[in-house]
């Protein structure tokens, strides 16, 4: 039985997540899947689902990007992501929210962040989704390093 506990602990090191009734929070080194977020927020009482998908682009300030590397203080990041989800549920008339973020090295076109929100009507889903991504970028301890052909630079000096 000890080996089962060992495997479970090893798996948790790869995926940090928290699912609380109407929220799904994931911080992982695995590939993010849009369908997972959609499936979580889908609800028969909801007529609108808004999904924001952030992708790694190939150009920043006129320089060609070759790779992004995301790192975080994982316990605090998951806690802050949950706070954002809870705040969105309080602030907007939404049913469910998923906030998933990748860490580690990502190539051009890869997905570092997905936010999905469901509500009875589209306006609340749109507004809560925008609130969640804007707040995440301002408050969650996830840092991004951009790599170029001629060097690299850390961005997101906050929080």
Image: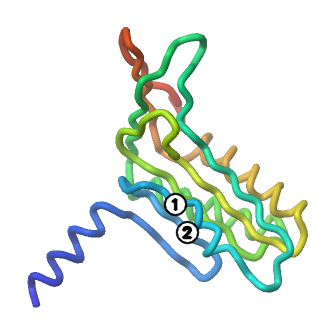
Element under label 1?
loop
Front one among 85 and 109? 109
Q: Is residue 107 left or right of residue 109?
A: left
Relative image position of residue 3 (x, y in whole percent): 10, 82
Front one among 92 and 32? 32
**Residue 89 picture quarter:** bottom right
Q: Which residue is mark 2?
A: 36
Query: Vertical placement of 87 versus 60: above or below?
Result: below
- Callout 2 crowding tier (Cα within 10 Å): few <14, some 14–19, many ≥20: some
Q: Which residue is mark 1?
A: 33
Position of the N terminus, as image quadrant, is bottom left
Relative image position of residue 15 (x, y in whole percent): 36, 63
The image's mark for residue 87 is: none
The residue lying at 45 percent from left, 37 percent from top is 143
Front one among 67 and 130? 67
The residue lying at 50 percent from left, 53 percent from top is 101
Relative image position of residue 84 (x, y in whole percent): 64, 59
- Callout 1 crowding tier (Cα within 10 Å): few <14, some 14–19, many ≥20: few
């Amino acid at each position: 039985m000890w080996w089962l506990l060992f495997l479970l602990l090893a798996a948790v090191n790869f995926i940090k997540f928290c699912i609380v009734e109407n929220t799904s929070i994931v911080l992982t080194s695995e590939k993010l899947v849009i369908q997972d977020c959609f499936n979580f927020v889908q609800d028969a009482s909801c007529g609108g689902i808004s999904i924001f998908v952030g992708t790694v682009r190939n150009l920043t300030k006129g320089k060609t990007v070759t790779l992004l590397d995301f790192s975080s203080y994982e316990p605090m990041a998951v806690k802050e992501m949950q706070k954002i989800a809870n705040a969105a549920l309080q602030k907007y008339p939404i049913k469910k929210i998923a906030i998933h973020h990748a860490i580690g090295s990502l190539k051009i076109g890869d997905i570092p962040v997905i936010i999905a929100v469901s509500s009875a009507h589209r306006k609340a889903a749109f507004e809560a989704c925008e609130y969640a991504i804007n707040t995440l970028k301002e408050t969650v301890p996830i840092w991004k390093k951009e790599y170029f052909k001629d060097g690299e630079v850390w961005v997101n000096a906050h929080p």
